[in-house]
Amino acid sequence: MGMDVKLEYKYNVKDFGAIGDGKTYDTSAIQQALDSASKDGGIVYFPQGTYLTGTLYLKSNVSVIMNGKATILASSEIECYGADTHFNRYAGEHFLDKCLIYAEDCVNIRIYGGTINGNGAEFYEDGKPDIIHPMLFRFLRCKNIWMEDVNITMPAGWSTAFIECEDIHIRGIDISSRHYNGDGLDFDSCRNVFVSDCNMDTSDDCLCIQNSVAGRVSRNIIVRNCVMKSRWAAVRIGLLNSGDIEDVVISDCIFHDTLCSGFKIQAAESGRIHDVLMSNIIMRNVTRPIFVTSNFCKMGVLEESARDSSKGIDGLYFKNIIIDNTSQEKPGSMDGIFVVGTPERKIRDVSLTDIRYHVLGGGGYTKKEIPELTGKRPEYYELDVSPSSVLYARHVAKLEMNRFFYDLEQDDLREPIIFEDVVMAGE
């Protein structure tokens, strides 16, 4: 099982009146079991069944163990969701404030097995989301969280949000999240995070590392042995980065069929992003394998610290990466690797080592001037069409390239590599 739990303390939700038929609300019974287990650090057990519920509040020293055929099913009625589950920290995204499972200022939470079904289709009409579409999990200021072998499916919003949490261990999670704002694992202002052996298929970022708290450092984050597919990004670091993000390792992962970016690293607020190592990665059919931007654009609802142009992105290390986009049906207008800063906030110290990039090619657009990102949300659609087919770098101080190999499947009218205001390592 991988978790140190006391099996002798077991609180079966059916002993508290839960029905598990998928039609009767079991919210009260489940909450009673959680509250009772918190008194002695016990286990709440879900036998086979489907448990319809509104918001549940996790407590300290409680382990939730679910039978492999047990499902927690989110209510489709927004009135069943609590109003006291904190809020989403992105500006303009209050529709994600509510959540199904919430924990605040808790320690020693364990969740093992079973399925969490967000019932997401019920929050959409004609393919468009309702005004409110709750996420599944939100943990605020919690410590020592374990999630293992959980199947997360059909959330109406994000799958998870870990905010100002520490000592997070996630292993063997399977996430299928294809509704609007369908993030997978989101870590905001967190420390000591360990993620492994997960499979994620999402409409938004599979895995997101950010920091909305000025003065707080998000650090010591390790992600390995994961498979990711997304309509947006496999891994995003930043965008919300009022605080610093440092000491991140992402290794031994596969990204596939991802429409926006493989690695999407964005310094948009006042914090620093540095010492990030990404190694032993395979990407197949990922439109923009690496997309790095640095500018100033307020994204969150919390107050930033004073902006300092000397703080941005420095120390990104990409090593031993295989990229193959030749399975794409047609060349994308923004295909390629992007490392784009601004005149006032350059990107510093980027290393591309042992990169093998198989490019579809076939592009015919040769425009070379693209807009500056100053004051804009740092997304690909603000940059117009890529002037290069392989790599475009601008406003970069110290770019290092070692054993960077590329080939094109089709002829391309664009130059393969273009540098503007770039200082190479050693110059």
Image: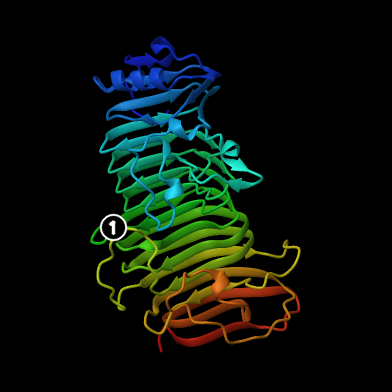
- Position of 69 compared to 60: left or right? right
Inspect this view and state whether residue 14 appears.
yes
Q: Quadrant of residue 297?
A: bottom left
Image coloring type = rainbow
Front one among 370 and 423:
370
Q: Which residue is mark 1?
A: 213
Q: Quick check: 41 above or below 252?
A: above
Q: How many marks?
A: 1
Question: Residue at the location (41% across, 41% down)?
Answer: 98
Question: Residue at the location (33% across, 36% down)?
Answer: 103
Front one among 39 and 166:
39
Give the secondary structure at mark 1: loop
Question: Residue at the location (35% across, 15% down)?
Answer: 10
Q: x, y (%) of residue 248?
A: 38, 58
Q: Amino acid at mark 1?
A: Val
Question: Residue at the location (31% across, 56% down)?
Answer: 219
Q: x, y (%) of residue 298?
A: 37, 67
- Position of 284 compared to 142: left or right? right
Q: Quick check: 230 above or below 392?
A: above
Q: Quadrant of residue 375?
A: bottom left
Inspect this view and state whether residue 2 appears.
no
- Position of 298 compared to 135: left or right? left
- What crowding class fits label 1: few (fewer than 14 Cα within 10 Å), some (14-19), or many (20 or more)? many
Quadrant in the picture for the C terminus: bottom left
